[in-house]
Image (tube, helix red, strand yellow):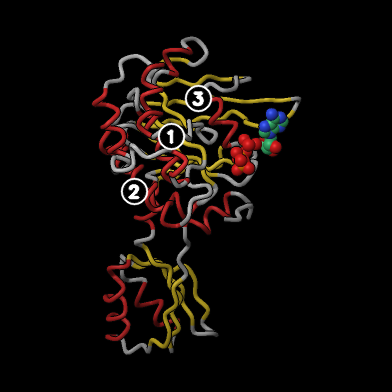
Amino acid sequence: MSIHELKTYPTVLSVNQVSKKIGGKLLVNRLSFDIHKGEIVGLLGPNGAGKTTTIRMIVGLISMSEGDIFVMDKSIRRNFTEAIAHIGGIIENPEFYRHMSGYDNLKQYQRMAEGITEERIMEVAKLVGLEQALHKRVKAYSLGMRQRLGIAQALLHRPSILILDEPMNGLDPAGIREMRDYLKQIARDEGIAILVSSHLLSEMELMCSRVIVIQQGELVTVRSLEEHQSETEYAKLKLRVDDAVRAKERLQRMEEVIITGIAPESKEIAVTVRERYIPRMVQALGEERIGLYRMEESRESLEDEFLKWTGGNYIA
Ligand SMILES: Nc1ncnc2c1ncn2[C@@H]1O[C@H](COP(=O)(O)OP(=O)(O)OP(=O)(O)O)[C@@H](O)[C@H]1O
């Protein structure tokens, strides 16, 4: 989904200048962001950044000190019940009757809520890949299966947004991969938004269309990962040539090449160039009989950027 497309999607969640103060300590400070239908968004930040506090406010587990949160245009402050009805959330590890089957647990939930059909139970079980194991007792489930049963339960009432706090915690690599695939499928098939908190940037990169980075309760940046990917089409290169001055003269005549530095003594020149123009650039140097001895890439990854945003407070 491109950024342009995103703008046409309705806003499902709007966090508006939200702050949380506990005992004189500001845990979240004037945080604002929007989430649209169908996108998976990562709430990313180092330990203690305020992710859980933010999520607990969104699902209505704790109050806000300032600001407001809107879910499908309903204010959590003014229309709490209506707003919360649009949310499916798993904050702490979901509790289940372990001696009962996954199916019986979902039936138990069905009895407490209104309008959940038998078809819906089977539909959500399928969505999270538990159809085969649905009649097994929960105590025989792996952690990943229990997490997915939690997601199935959270989806039963057809929420507009699914909110998950560190859903990959404790899962092994295969479980993480499964969870990622199911979440992508849920966003697509149910057409809902998903907000996932994590301190694992690498995980978010594989799953999210955007990441919201917070640090010490404040918004650091909101990044579209597609935007990042298109940026990485540009390569930052350091070339070692036999004549850096002549190389510069030739390359600055090429529109596709931006010269970012030159060190004539060490015969080096730094350029930024669209990846697909690299062969043309090398050819141009050859035509001028400028010898190219080495070409090194210095590409900034999202991880490098994250370290820059959070002042190195990234440990995953
Ligand atoms: N009830 C509370 N009273 C006082 N301080 C709190 C309370 N809850 C959380 N904090 C503090 O607020 C800060 C943010 O905590 P929070 O749990 O939201 O961060 P987080 O980003 O979810 O971190 P983690 O990844 O470690 O869970 C931390 O410094 C934490 O110690």
Where disc 3 sits, the SS reads loop
Residue on which disc 2 sits? 181
Q: Are marks 3 and 2 in contact (CB under 8 Å)?
A: no
Q: In the rendered image, which quarter is residue 137 located in?
A: top left
Q: Are marks 3 and 1 in contact (CB under 8 Å)?
A: no
Furthest toward the front, the residue is 99
Q: Upstream in the sequence, badge 3 or badge 2? A: 3
Q: Residues within 10 Å of mark 3 (few under 14, many from 20)?
A: many
Give the residue type at disc 2. Answer: Asp
Chain-order first, disc 3 or disc 1: 3
What residue lies at 27% left-to-right and 85% top-to-bottom? Answer: 287
The foreground one among 212 and 153 is 153
Q: Residues within 10 Å of mark 2 (few under 14, many from 20)?
A: some
Visible in this render: residue 222? no
Q: CA distance from mark 3 to mark 2?
A: 24 Å
**Residue at image mark 3:** 59
* Ligand 1 quadrant in view: top right
Which residue is depicted at the point 32% across and 31% down?
A: 192
Residue at the (51%, 57%) spot, across then down: 303
Can you identify the residue that label 1 sits on? Answer: 150
The answer to whether 12 appears left or right of 202 in the picture is: left
